[in-house]
Image (cartoon, rainbow, N blue to C red):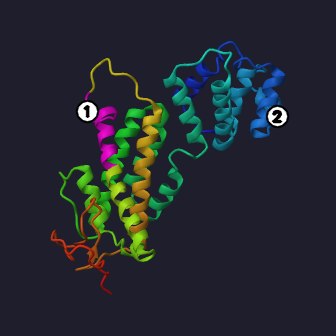
């Protein structure tokens, strides 16, 4: 049984023009062939006719009986069919975006959240698990909520890991400084030592950009997410924007949780890299830069 929600089902009913028992412009034969080509299943089997034999009723039975992955593949195929059909009328962009996002979610491709869930599960952090589930479910059904939750998840992961590493952040710290503080506390020296000097500069730049991505998530939340009242005529949020925020949040959180688990304690007096662009390495328990001379050798973690 798929997890296609009632709002998502209603969106697909509209998108696929299922009101009269039809599915778009398919005949019985062409629809059956389309389903076989897309997912390798025979939608003419008796189990799919429990609600009736029309194409729409068989499709409704299909998305009730089959697993998320299979249903997601079929619905993605139907979305692509609509997008490639130059003869038929085009649905509105918000409707098409919601349906595309719902199909992607069913396939487990929603922002690659499965690895993030795997990273959180061993830590037994129920609040983070709830945030991830809320964010994933809301991408298509409530994009503004997904964007707001993406920003909150970055905050929650950063504050949780900082506290576990013995350096809790002030409650009123803004998102970008919080992310920079978080990355500066992780033992990232092993990433620099695993490559050449030229490669180390690339790693520094990627980590700096990772911190900057969180700033973008926060700004997107201010513009389109929940948490601030909007004017009554504000347009619906495109699910693609929600997917962007969720992907960015997931990338940051997965990296932070991975390094935190791989190197569980920074220890006292360890040198950590500060991810701000152009910043020098800093003492983990100090705000003063070390090795201030240009071209100075990177500090090593003490043993």
Report the mark closest to the observer, 2 or 1.
1
In the depicted view, which residue is nearer to us: 216 or 112?
Answer: 216
Label 1 secondary element? loop
Q: Quadrant of the C terminus?
A: bottom left
Q: Residue at x 40, y 68 (%)?
A: 259
Which one is nearer the viewer's eye here, 267 or 138? Answer: 267
Mark 2: few, some, or many residues within 10 Å (few <14, many ≥20)? some
* Disc marking residue 167: none
Crowding near the residue tagged with mark 1, few <14, some 14–19, many ≥20 C-alpha atoms within 10 Å: few
Residue identified by numbered label 2 = 42
Residue depicted at x 53% and y 44%: 110
In the image, the segment drawn in magenta is 214-229
Q: Is residue 104 visible?
A: yes
Magenta stretch contains residue 228: yes
21 relative to 191, above or below: above
In percent of width and height, residue 75 lies at 65, 33
- What's the mark number on residue 228? 1
**Horizontal placement of 248 versus 18: left or right?**
left
């Amino acid at each position: 049984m798929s997890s296609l929600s009632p709002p998502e089902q209603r969106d697909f009913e509209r998108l696929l023009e299922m009101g009269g028992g039809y599915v778009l412009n398919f005949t019985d034969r062409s629809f059956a062939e389309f389903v076989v080509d897309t997912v390798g299943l025979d939608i003419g089997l008796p189990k799919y006719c429990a609600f009736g034999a029309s194409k729409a009723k068989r499709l409704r039975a299909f998305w009730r009986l089959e697993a998320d992955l299979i249903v997601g593949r079929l619905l993605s195929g139907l979305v692509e069919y609509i997008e490639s059909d130059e003869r038929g009328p085009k649905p509105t962009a918000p409707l098409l975006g919601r349906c595309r996002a719902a199909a992607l979610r069913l396939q487990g491709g929603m922002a690659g959240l499965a690895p993030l869930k795997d990273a959180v599960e061993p830590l037994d952090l129920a609040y983070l698990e709830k945030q991830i589930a809320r964010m994933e479910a809301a991408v298509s059904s409530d994009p503004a909520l997904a964007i707001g939750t993406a920003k909150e998840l970055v905050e929650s992961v950063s504050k949780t890991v900082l506290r576990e590493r013995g350096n809790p952040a002030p409650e009123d710290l803004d998102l970008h400084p919080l992310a920079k503080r978080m990355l500066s506390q992780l033992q990232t020296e092993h990433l620099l030592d695993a490559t050449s000097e030229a490669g180390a500069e690339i790693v520094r730049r990627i980590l700096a950009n990772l911190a900057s991505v969180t700033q973008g998530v926060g700004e997107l939340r201010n513009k389109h997410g929940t948490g601030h009242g909007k004017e009554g005529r504000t347009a619906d949020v495109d699910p693609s924007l929600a997917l962007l925020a969720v992907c960015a949040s997931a990338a940051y959180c997965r990296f932070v949780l991975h390094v935190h688990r791989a190197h569980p304690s920074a220890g006292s007096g360890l040198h950590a890299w500060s991810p701000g662009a152009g910043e020098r390495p800093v003492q983990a328990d100090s705000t003063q830069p070390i090795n201030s001379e240009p071209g100075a050798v990177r500090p090593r973690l003490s043993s």
